[in-house]
Amino acid sequence: MMKVLIADDSAVVRDRLTTLLTDLHGIKVVGQAKDATEARNLAEELRPDVAILDVRMPKGSGADVLRDIKKLNPTPKVIMLTNYPHPETRKKCIDGGADHFFDKSTEFKKVLSVLRGMVRDPAKS
């Protein structure tokens, strides 16, 4: 069972992701965070296989949380999901260790495709 942590300041986004992911075989949403502090704490406590992070959150940025999460052992895969898909933001996140970077408004469903692929073939992710 792949454990997923969702960190986004929007309850609507968290709920939508949780609903979509609950329907996927082999995936369990183990936690939801509404800000950067909570995301860090839950990642450390729950040790998810995958963290889905918003770039802009209260109490810090998703890019900062990304850096901290990538220090965990085992290291989770990180999917950045944002309404601000600017090239410089994308570069900062990818350079910081993000495995994927998606625009919420146009690429939301890609999160599901990536996770489905990880469940089917963990070596590819």
Image (spheres, grey):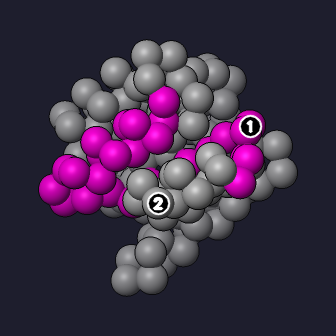
As helix, strand or loop, the secondary structure at mark 2 comes to helix
Residue extending farthest left: 73
Label 2 neighbour load within 10 Å: few <14, some 14-19, many 20+: few
Q: Is residue 36 left or right of residue 74?
A: right
- Relative image position of residue 42 (x, y in whole percent): 29, 31
Q: Nearer the viewer, residue 70 or 123?
A: 70
Secondary structure of the residue carrying numbered label 1 = loop
- Give the magenta range: 61-87
Q: Which mark is residue 47?
A: none
Describe residue 40's horizontal placement relative to residue 57 as left or right.
left
Q: CA distance from mark 1 to mark 2?
A: 19 Å
**Of residues 55 and 26, which is closer to you in this image?**
55
The dot on residue 95 is 2
Q: Earlier in the sequence, mark 1 or mark 2?
A: 1
Tell me which residue sits at (29%, 53%) in the image.
70
Q: Residue at x 25, y 27 (%)?
A: 41
Identify whether 86 is placed above or below 41.
below
43 or 118: nearer the viewer = 43
Residue 84 seen: yes
User: Percent x, y for residue 123?
Assistant: 37, 83
Compared to 118, does 51 lie above or below? Answer: above
Residue depth check, mark 1 versus mark 2: number of the one nearer the observer: 2
Q: Is residue 52 or residue 1 the one in the foreground?
A: 52
Does the magenta-highlighted stretch encompass residue 103? no
Which mark, by number, is residue 83?
1
Which residue is depicted at the point 67% across and 40% down? 82
Q: Quadrant of the C terminus?
A: bottom left
Q: Is residue 76 magenta?
A: yes
